[in-house]
Image (cartoon, rainbow, N blue to C red):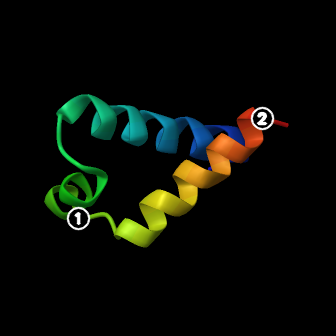
Amino acid sequence: MSTTSKEDHWLELITQCRSSGLTGHQWCIENGIPVSTFYYHVLALRKKAFQ
C-alpha cells in the first residue's frame, strides 16, 4: 500500500469514527483497532495537514 493510500485509508477510518457519535476509544474497541494505533494516525495526519 502506498503512503497516500494508507493515509486515505486512515482518513476514512477517522471520518467513520468521528461521524459515529462514539468516543475514539469506544469506536476503536468496537472496530478492533488498537487505540494507540488510531491516535498515532490521527496525530500524523493532523501534523501533515499543518505542514
Q: Position of residue 43 (x, y in %)?
A: 60, 53
Numbered label attached to residue 32: 1
Q: Which residue is drawn at the image coordinates 18% and 44% (left, top)?
A: 22
Q: Is residue 42 above or below residue 29?
A: above
| Label 2 crowd (10 A; few <14 / some 14-19 / many >=20) | few
Spot the residue most to the right.
Answer: 51
**In front: 33, or 49?**
49
> SS class of the residue under badge 1?
loop
Q: Position of residue 15 (x, y in %)?
A: 38, 32
17 relative position to 11: left or right: left
Q: Are marks 2 and 1 in contact (CB under 8 Å)?
A: no
4 relative position to 13: left or right: right
Mark 1 residue type: Gly
Numbered label attached to residue 46: none
22 relative position to 35: left or right: left
Q: Which residue is drawn at the image coordinates 53% and 49% (left, top)?
A: 42
**Residue ID for mark 2:** 50
Can residue 12 be seen by looking at this rendering?
Answer: yes
Q: Which residue is drawn at the image coordinates 72% and 34% (left, top)?
A: 49
Mark 2 residue type: Phe
